[in-house]
Image: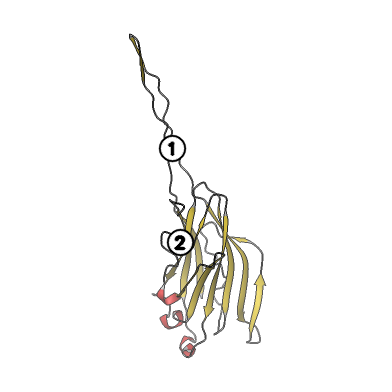
């Protein structure tokens, strides 16, 4: 199963405008003016994986748990995937991949964020994709979930999954699991490909 993640940032700006001032004095005309300045704010988000926990098939055929708690930066667009799944990775019912992520605001506008699931239905098996459950949960207990086949975008509204103010950081967990159900045999030997995209969008109001 191939999986990719892209950190996408929508850069919106705000402007500050200095006013031109004019004045007239006695019999002489004189104009006093100031220059106009436009200052564009920046939306700069950093995305870091803080921990990866996998439950996958070991060499003996049993499910085994491994943990990697080394920080890994995913800020730039990348072909790496947050779950470190290789192209030849095999999974079984009960397999899961869980990542603890931190999204940081290094700009000067507040933003909200959400997770987009892009399911490649052309090359993927939909039966298998209907058994792969994706759950996102934030530190403030906002929880959204979808099956990969449904390709739902998690938190795409005016509030998002959370809001990160200037200089702030919010953590959230993304979990992908192969759900154990009565149809698992239909997934044998099948393939699924999808992307996860993290969007950060300027938050206009504090409410």
| Residue 155 x, y percent position in the rendering | 44, 65
Q: Nearer the viewer, residue 179 or 33?
A: 33
| Residue 183 x, y percent position in the rendering | 46, 89
Q: Nearer the viewer, residue 50 or 1?
A: 50
Disc with the residue nearer the chain's start (2 vs 1): 1
Residue at point 57% right, 78% down? 96
Vertical relation: 142 (above or below) 19: below
Q: Quadrant of residue 75?
A: bottom right
Residue topped by disc 1? 16
| Residue 170 x, y percent position in the rendering | 56, 59
Report whether 8 appears left or right of 171: left
Q: Quadrant of residue 140?
A: bottom right
Q: CA distance from mark 2 to mark 1?
A: 27 Å
Q: Nearer the viewer, residue 178 or 85?
A: 178
Does residue 21 appear in this view? yes
Q: Quadrant of residue 74?
A: bottom right
View extreme (top): residue? 27
Does residue 84 appear in this view? no
Vertical relation: 131 (above or below) 142: below
Residue topped by disc 2? 160
Q: Residues within 10 Å of mark 1 (few under 14, many from 20)?
A: few
Label total for image:
2
| Secondary structure found at label 1 | loop
Residue at point 66% right, 67% down? 69
Residue at point 58% right, 64% down? 101
Quadrant of the image containing the C terminus = bottom left
View extreme (front): residue? 207
């Amino acid at each position: 199963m191939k999986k990719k993640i892209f950190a996408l940032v929508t850069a919106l700006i705000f402007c500050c405008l200095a006013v031109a001032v004019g004045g007239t004095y006695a019999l002489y005309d004189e104009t006093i003016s100031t220059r106009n300045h436009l200052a564009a704010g920046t939306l700069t988000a950093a995305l870091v994986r803080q921990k990866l926990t996998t439950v996958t098939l070991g060499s003996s055929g049993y499910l085994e748990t491994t943990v990697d708690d080394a920080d890994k930066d995913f800020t730039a667009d990348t072909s790496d995937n947050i779950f470190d799944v290789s192209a030849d990775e095999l999974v079984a019912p009960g397999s899961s991949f869980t990542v603890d992520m931190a999204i940081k605001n290094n700009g000067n506008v507040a933003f909200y964020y959400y997770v987009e699931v892009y399911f490649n239905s052309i090359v993927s098996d939909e039966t298998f994709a209907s058994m792969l459950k994706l759950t996102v949960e934030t530190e403030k207990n906002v929880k959204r979930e979808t099956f990969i086949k449904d390709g739902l975008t998690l938190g795409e509204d005016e509030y998002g999954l959370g809001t990160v103010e200037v200089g702030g950081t919010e953590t959230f967990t993304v979990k992908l699991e192969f759900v154990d159900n009565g149809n698992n045999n239909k997934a044998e030997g099948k393939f699924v490909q999808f992307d996860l995209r993290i969007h950060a969008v300027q938050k206009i109001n504090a409410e």
